[in-house]
Image: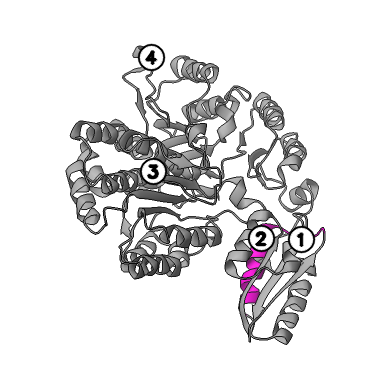
Amino acid sequence: MTVVKNLVKKSFFRDSLQLMRLSEEVKKLPGILDAAVLMATDTNKEILQKLGLLTSEGEEASKDDMILAVKAKDESTADEALRKIEDMLMKVPAAAAPEAGRICYSVDSALEAMPDANFAIVSVPGEYAKDVVMDLLKRDIHVHVFSDHVPIEDEVEMKRFASERGLLVLGPGAGTSIINGKAIAFANVVRRGSVGIVAAAGTGLQEVSVLLDRIGLGVSQALGIGGNDVKKEVGGIMAIDCIRALEADRKTKLIMVVAKPPDKEVMKKITKVITEETRKPFIICFQSLREYKPPKKLARRVKAVRGLHAAAIQAVKLLKTKAVQKAHKRISMRPRELRALAMKLAKKLKPSQKYIRALYTGGTLMYEAMLIYRELIGNVYSNAPLSSRYKLPDPHRSFKHSVIDLGEEEFTAGRPHPMIDPTVRKLRLIEEAKDPSVAVILMDFMLGYGSHEDPAGAMVDSIEEAMKIAEEDGRNLIILGHVCGTRKDPQNLVEQERKLKKIGVQLFPSNALAVIASALIVKRGKVKADRLRKVYRSFVGI
């Protein structure tokens, strides 16, 4: 008879990634059917409940406690597993393995190990980030702040100090950069080239750099500045410094800026710098309700788009005008082709199947989806909506058309980001499949360094289960996907796409195309041609 046991460690903390790896190790123990080691946040307790791993002891734990949960073939096996977990938790990470590098516990010890370092990644709890970053900046070291929840006043102080010293502070709130061809944090393996990118968010940078790679262009530098940078409180400090840096970089021939619309005063500053201090061509991709219109005197060399796919196509037009058609063949689908595919898929649905449920790990891709849906099917509900009127009362329960950012705090408190750990999305997918009104489920699969070692493979069982739930209920469930990655990524684009196609997932070369397809499916192809052309022009670049 199977046994479920919880052990609560009071006021005990470990990094969520460490706990995820530990959980996977415990699952491999003989006689263990399932296991999880998590901080006792409300979200994590809900997950344990759905997995059948929560007991009354775990239910009573507070958010500062840790829950050790196991499901075993018998009580003695469960007890032994809990003892092993405790032993594993108490072990100090070994620094002896040469492949692991040297473990340092201060900036001083890190610089002793690498005295010539001029760039550092900081990943500590947000409230402590400033102290570490300022220490590094005072030593003339550029910093990428990977930490979340950094107080905005700390961000302003760090960035002003860095700017005065000619240093860069990338992030916080942007988990991706590519510097001199080296991937920083969540980033893909893309070819080197002449496009320099300044991006306010990580997955937006990933999507556009991957699309550039697929059409034969490459990245000189890609700098993630964080979403707050273009807000009036920060004032675009790093956006402007990064634009200046790329203007001075000989290998950069074109500069691309990707962000949600800056506040008005920041927009004026950025436009002034582009006008007075630059000569290179620019692509401005502000993901906004209305397209940014550059001043007339900049019209020749500054092009504005609303979508990431369109930004990549515009880069080809500016740098390789003869290769535009070839680029479209690699990453685009014509409106007529996409409409035909959507209508073919829609024929599998019952009239009662009306709604889209989009489950995103990438926040920028989710935001782009909402902009496109607004044009084609109207506003959609979300845990991070375009308008507060469409905010889901409960982020764990969808309503009508719903687009979910699973990387938001309500899903990540005390656990790894869904790009690393797919558990939250797997559970949500099953819940959505049970809703008979759902027609389409849309998902992104982010490859690259930092992401799960097999994002597609990790979802296969849950996708098949979701399809089976629908089938047993006498209906079809259409699952669409976009794999953001390259052939050179550790997970390999071709292999990831193969796994998804094999189980019936319909894939698209970009997020924008997947979103447009999902809208066409639920509309049964009935979208006016001029409206579809307008969306294509803004978001796909055709």
Image-based side of 255 in relation to 162, left or right: left
Lower position in the chain sequence, tag 3 or tag 4: 3
Which label sits on residue 61? 1
Q: Marks 1 and 3, Cα distance to the nearest angstrom? A: 50 Å
Image-based side of 498 in relation to 424, left or right: left
Residue closer to the observer: 259 or 223 = 259
Image-based side of 363 in relation to 157, left or right: left
Residue 14 in the magenta stretch? The answer is yes
Q: Is residue 180 visible?
A: no
Q: Residue at x 71, y 81 (%)?
A: 78
Residue designated by label 3: 218
Three-letter residue code for mark 1? Ala
- The mark lying in front, picked from 3 and 4, is 4
Query: CB atoms at circles 1 and 2 under 8 Å apart?
Result: yes
Q: Marks 1 and 2, Cα distance to the nearest angstrom? A: 9 Å
Q: Is residue 95 above or below residue 343?
A: below
Position of residue 424 measured from the top left corner of the image (x, y, whole percent): 55, 58
Residue designated by label 4: 295
Q: Marks 3 and 4, Cα distance to the nearest angstrom? A: 28 Å
| Label 2 Cα crowd, 10 Å radius (few <14 / some 14-19 / many 20+) | many
| Label 3 Cα crowd, 10 Å radius (few <14 / some 14-19 / many 20+) | many
Lower position in the chain sequence, tag 1 or tag 2: 2
Boundaries of the magenta span: 11-28
Residue designated by label 2: 45
Q: Hey, which quadrant is residue 66 in on the image?
A: bottom right
Residue closer to the observer: 521 or 514 = 521
- At numbered mark 4, what does the secondary structure look like: helix, strand or loop? loop
Q: Marks 3 and 2, Cα distance to the nearest angstrom? A: 44 Å
